[in-house]
Amino acid sequence: MQRRRSLPDVLAGGIFVLIGGVFVVGALGYDRGTPLRMGPGYFPLMVGAIVAVLGLAIIVKGLVAGEVIPSEAVPWRAVVLIVLAVVFFGFFIGSLGFVPTSAVTALLTTLASRRVRLLTALAVSAGLTVAATLIFVVGLQLRIPLWGPGFVF
Amino acid sequence: MDLFDNLVLGFSTALLVQNVLYCFVGVLLGTAVGVLPGIGPTATVAMLLPITFNFEPVTALIMLAGIYYGAQYGGSTTAILINLPGESSAAVTALDGHEMARQGRAGPALAAAAIGSFIAGTVATVVLAVAAPPLAAVALKFGPADYFALVLFGLIVSIALARGSALKALAMIALGILLGTVGQDIYTGTPRFVLGQRELYGGIDFVSVAVGMFGIAEILRNLENERDRPSVLDRVTSLWPTREDRRRIVGPIARGTGLGAALGVLPGGGHVLASFTSYAVEKRISKRRSEFGHGAIEGVAGPESANNAAAQTSFIPLLTLGLPAHPVMALMVGAFIVHGITPGPNVITDEPALVWGLIASMWIGNVLLVLLNLPLIGIWVRMLRIPYQVLFPMIVLFAVIGTYSLGSNEYDVYAIAFFGILGYVLIKCGCEPAPLLLGFVLGPLLEENLRRALIISRGDATVFLTRPISATLLALTVAALAIAAFPAIRKRREVVFAEED
Amino acid sequence: MRTSSTPRMIATFAAVSLIAACSGNGNGGAEGGDAAGYPEQNITVVVPFSAGGPTDTVTRMIADPMAKALGGKIVVQNVEGAGGTVAAGQVAQARPDGYTVLMHHIGMSTAPALYKDLGYQPLEDFATVGLVTEVPMTVVARKDFPPTTLADLTTYVKANSAKVTLANAGIGAASHLCGLLFQAAAGVKLQEVPYQGTGPALTDLVGGQVDFMCDQTTNTTGQISAGKVKAYAVTTPERVKSLPDVPTTAEAGMPQLAVSVWHGLYVPTGTPPEIVQKLSGALKTALADQAVIDQMAKLGTAPVAAADATPEAHRAHLEEQLTTWAKVISDAGVKAS
């Protein structure tokens, strides 16, 4: 594998440093205890520091001799729509109920593909909603109301 | 001939018509829920437990056990077909299994998994019948210090899961451990990193991490370039393993079975450790190490065998000591109680028909699973013919519903989105999700046992070196770390030399 | 429907119809009515712990007979998290129409002392329906632990308080509360070793990694009768049928150590009293059901007396327990958040 300066390596290292750092800062707020009688903060502090140090090592390595990773363009439409779909489900399942929430989630997800036409998307999401209702509510007896209290026409 | 009498008793119980029937219902249900993302065996057993209240005790337990090991089969099917591991152990199967599926070899991958699981299940059932009490005694010898050393060893070994850089794999493991600390600290009750949300007190759910880092991230990668998405079916060569494949899976199956049978006995992380230790072993001893991560059939057969062997032997602590090694076993303890059987070491002598009937049923269940799964392979492979525009919304929708159904907790759903993005970005940067997932599963065990060992030893850290099991495992860990670092160093030298040329 | 023709669907539907055939009750969701016609829709009983656990098992045992007595349907929903406080918080906010009911155990009375910013108050935000059952606890030790009686144990742990380890199943668990009560009664502070649930704790006790603990009879009876652990006492006023040789704590000279894992049903405050009475009546009917009595006996417990399955008796018990645990927990300096 060819090795040279690698932006993905630097980015990956940066993510590790960031997350490790956030946990280290958070862990400082908890009681650390002693190495031999650890408090709740000790272990996350230690592991957070390890993550950050490994992240730094990856950055340094990425600047000197990184991995070259073939990359494609980010599908922004899919990223936005799928995240929206998942968050929508979590946010509204309690109030809207199973059927409306599943239908919207399915529709948003289906539209994440650039090659789908609206009519197809509607058909697919309707089919998936029916299938999901049959499998999860009728079959597996999930305790989620089909139509929630917050659902009004 | 005690064993012989016991087996006769067991089979005469397990072969009763209603027992075979419910064994079949159990493995069928298990396979089905294993295939559905999100809903795992624990949730299913919990849901079906009340129904079994009216069954004969042995019938109830046969069915519940069938769900448990049936789900291990089903989980690997989705791991191979759509890169969505339903259980932590299936994350390992996804590595090479899904790669094989992308190359049009989903059939051989599924067959290797099914055959490996069957052989492992059979051998492990024999182990269960012959050596349960001594193995259980060994498992009890494991104290917190030994578990800490075992888990640490397992984590270091899992660096081998990575295709690329060992450094990144190590960072992903550590990140997984870190994410595992979210939630209430069991020692002090302090809520850690919960952002003030009580819903996070129980920590981040494994299913959310797996669905996000594997499922969503994979979908986003596939949507990067839709036009060029190769039609997998065009390249389907054969449904069945070739003669070469069959030759290559013999060793991995044998080794995986041994590893799985041994590690499965340990309560807690045993069955998780089994599958990825097997992967690491196969990768290390293979002559085709570079194929691992790119569709090596050994990387499917070994871990799948280990996983299934462990699923069987994890019943040993339950049957001989009445102690549950897995949440599903804890539910089965509940089933014992409801049926008026006091769980404990006396069950095996007080209720021989029940214990031996259950053991025999496991073998029958494995036969049923093979009969069920081998013909299904063709159907599963044809599932890849579903247009991707239908398949990926189905995966997303079923995954969020399944995840939500576990605890009616919307934060589990939000976590899917978070880990989907994190996984996508990290994968694009050359970091693979499998080591993170294993760090996430084993991290809490690592911290728990580290702190517990130190509490029990009254802060005497030498306990890790004075206990023989722990000392041996720590020595192995150091060796594994050295071996993992060594090729990286050697490769760097090679690169340097290559550049000089 | 495009996807239904796929084999995956066929396989799933096969499984689904099987489950449906096994369980066979649907799930409606019409809007609710008033007290006279109650129940007009499914009643949801929220269980704050995982499915299959002791609290869940007890709930599912009484759900069907209660539903029959009410002439409606009951569905059980598990809402887990933070020692049951997530579920209690949700039910406290639910519409007080009798269609959302909470099953909770002793944790209802300990949460205010353990958690700050609980978001609800047990006495103000809930109306009590009735007590359900009380599960006794046992004090057990690894089998080679030197003390042989509860009195011996007290002396021994006092003399060896720097060495002895006391296991429990985590903050706020019944085993933890019982352990606190023991330490208070014995006047000693011991090194506690928390576990993630009872199973691993008991495993380490049988394996001799820790010295002693308290646990519910449902978990310990089998280990005690097999001689894998040593039992000192049961924590109820009377001996337990399945363990006739184990003395009560009062007999063993420690009457202060009285604790049981009691369960009760709650509805949000503001629920019409007639509906509470209907629920309480149904609970009484369910607890008198021979099948329920038999199933509970297998769990090593029994339904409470009919007089205790009432809103008044339940409320009195809750008040008493809230006071007891507030003191025990604050004396021990324990906090969960």
Image (cartoon, coloured by chain):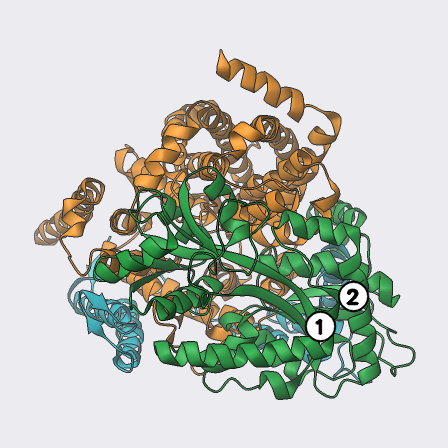
Chain colours: A cyan, B orange, C green
Q: Which mark is residue C130?
A: 1
Q: Amino acid at mark 2?
A: Lys
Q: Mark 2, residues whose alpha carbon is within 10 Å: few (<14), some, or many (≥20)?
A: many
For the residue pair C187 and B77, the one nearer the viewer reads as: C187
x and y percentages locating residue C45 in the rendered image: 71, 69
x and y percentages locating residue C78 in the rendered image: 63, 65
Q: Decide if residue B79 is in sight here.
A: no
Tell me the distance, in whole angstroms, between the alpha carbons under discs 2 and 1: 8 Å
Question: To which quarter of the image does residue B8 belong?
Answer: top right
Identify the element where label 1 is drawn. Answer: strand
For the residue pair B445 and A131, the one nearer the viewer reads as: B445
Q: Which mark is residue C284?
A: 2
Residue B182 in the figure: left or right of residue B396: left
Q: Which mark is residue B378?
A: none
Which residue does the image show at 41% across and 77% down from the upper left?
Answer: C329
The chain carrying label 2 is C
For the residue pair B47 and C288, the one nearer the viewer reads as: C288
x and y percentages locating residue A59 in the rendered image: 21, 70
Q: Amino acid at mark 1?
A: Gly
Q: Say whether marks 2 and 1 touch (CB < 8 Å).
A: yes
User: Is B117 above or below relative to C242?
Assistant: above
Question: To which quarter of the image does residue B303 belong?
Answer: top left
Which residue does the image show at 42% across and 82% down from the upper left?
Answer: B195
Question: To which quarter of the image does residue B452 belong?
Answer: bottom left
User: Is B205 above or below relative to B127?
Assistant: below
For the residue pair B449 and C137, the one nearer the viewer reads as: C137
